[in-house]
């Protein structure tokens, strides 16, 4: 027989109190370089694209410098945001917290997990980092992308999650019939 015992919301553990492990500190310079690269390309394009209108052409250099300054600011923000990322692998779920001003915490129940893969760009590999991508039932794409793990840690987490997948969902013990 199935029972559904009500829970007291005041006694539930708070997600904010869950112990989270910071991602690798190497993610910060990696994310900053990614931002610098993107904004540098935009600044170069802004300075090289010929503008035919004289008033616009007079402002072309200032536009390129403005884009470069904005890119530098975005790289600094990316650095600080990456330093605040953390994850937690618990018995029944995987948590990932990110964001600088807007904090986003994702919780992925392991019973919904269907597929796990690791990915890394050439820049991430240069920093020894790997992204762990988790897919769930019914999702069209990755449901959780955990960035900033050292390669060995990402492989260990991946193997743990795959072992959980092979074991199947935990089935609660049956209650004896009255």
Image (tube, rainbow, N blue to C red):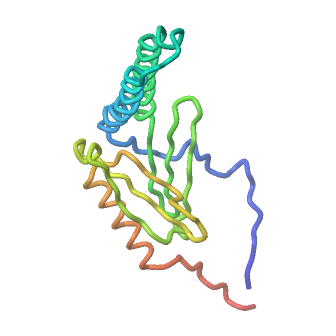
- Nearest the viewer among 96 and 139 is 139
Name the residue rendered at 40%, 23% in the picture: 43
- Nearest the viewer among 132 and 32 is 32
- Nearest the viewer among 52 and 20 is 52
- Give the answer, above or below, for where 88 lies relative to 68: below
Quadrant of the frame with the N terminus? bottom right
Name the residue rendered at 27%, 43% in the picture: 123
The furthest residue to the bottom: 177
Picture coordinates of residue 83, whole percent (x, y): 40, 33
Name the residue rendered at 41%, 35% in the picture: 82
Name the residue rendered at 31%, 32% in the picture: 29
Picture coordinates of residue 144, whole percent (x, y): 50, 55
- Give the answer, above or below, for where 102 lies relative to 119: above
Q: Quadrant of residue 115?
A: bottom left
Report whether 40 appears left or right of 135: left
Picture coordinates of residue 135, whole percent (x, y): 50, 65
- Give the answer, above or below, for where 4 lies relative to 37: below
Quadrant of the frame with the C terminus? bottom right
What is the tally of numbered marks visible in this picture?
Answer: 0
Picture coordinates of residue 111, whole percent (x, y): 55, 70
- Nearest the viewer among 75 and 81 is 75
Report whether 44 appears left or right of 53: left
């Amino acid at each position: 027989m199935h029972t559904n015992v009500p829970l007291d919301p005041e006694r539930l553990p708070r997600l904010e109190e869950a112990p989270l492990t910071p991602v690798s500190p190497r993610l910060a310079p990696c994310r900053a370089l990614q931002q610098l690269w993107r904004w540098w390309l935009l600044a170069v394009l802004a300075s090289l694209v010929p503008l035919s209108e004289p008033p616009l052409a007079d402002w072309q250099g200032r536009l390129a410098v403005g884009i470069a300054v904005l890119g530098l600011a975005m790289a600094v923000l990316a650095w600080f945001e990456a330093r605040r990322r953390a994850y937690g692998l618990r018995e029944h779920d995987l948590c990932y917290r990110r964001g600088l001003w807007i904090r986003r915490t994702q919780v992925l129940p392991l019973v919904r997990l269907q597929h796990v893969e690791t990915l890394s760009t050439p820049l991430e590999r240069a920093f020894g980092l790997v992204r762990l991508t988790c897919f769930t039932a019914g999702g069209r794409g990755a449901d959780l992308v955990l960035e900033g793990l050292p390669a060995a840690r990402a492989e260990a987490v991946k193997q743990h999650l795959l072992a959980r997948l092979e074991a199947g969902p935990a089935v609660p013990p049956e209650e004896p019939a009255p």
